[in-house]
Image (spheres, helix red, strand yellow):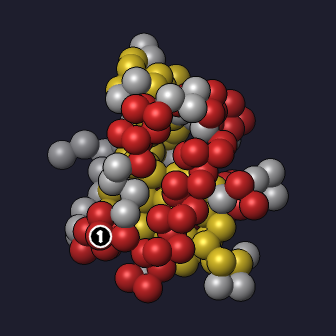
Amino acid sequence: MHIRPAVLKDASKACDTLRRSIAELCVADHGNDKAILGQWLANKTPEVFASWLKDTGNTVLVADHNGLIAAVGVVNNDGEITCNYVSPDFRFQGVSKLLLAGLEAVSLKQGNSGTTLFSTKTAHGFYRAAGYKNGGTPFFKFGTESYPMFKRLAQNGPDIAKRS
């Protein structure tokens, strides 16, 4: 397994991973509601993925396993992890932990003292186990519950990511 920066030729495979992860692993969040699932999947297209790569405010990483995209993650320059999904084929194999460590390393390199994210119900326990703390009241977005979370990464930094 290799964590690396995503490239344009990853777009189709990465979107397949994103879409399968959401549809198959996040049922606790969308409840197989077609309207909710449709909203969630609407921007998981190769064109939108390409725009994430072009956005200099984002770093897009993939977990590459012999040419298969096992996971996809995005962290922005402010240390917010905006995307972190694993293929159902690689769930519970440590891929998500490796990708999360890569996203956190990018955040530190960018000068952030920590990371923030909005977790799904499905991933909430995963992030808690990885050292993330709840950072506010859960709220509903696109019909699913989101949990604001944060993690201090730098030894002497505050419990939030750098904000401009």
Instruction: Find numbered disc 1 in the image and state the secondary structure of the residue it sits on.
Output: helix
Furthest residue in direction top, as rendered: 137
Q: Position of residue 65 (x, y in %)?
A: 70, 78
Q: Quadrant of residue 98?
A: bottom right
Furthest residue in direction left, as rendered: 164
What residue is at 33 percent from the left and 53 percent from the top?
43
What residue is at 35 percent from the left and 49 percent from the top?
42
Vertically, is 85 above or below 157? below
What residue is at 60 percent from the left and 51 percent from the top?
21
Q: Position of residue 66 (x, y in %)?
A: 71, 85
Q: Out of 108 and 71, give the one closest to the viewer.
A: 71
Q: Is residue 154 visible?
A: no
Furthest residue in direction front, as rendered: 34
Residue named by callout 1: 47
Furthest residue in direction right, as rendered: 93
Vertically, is 24 above or below 51? above
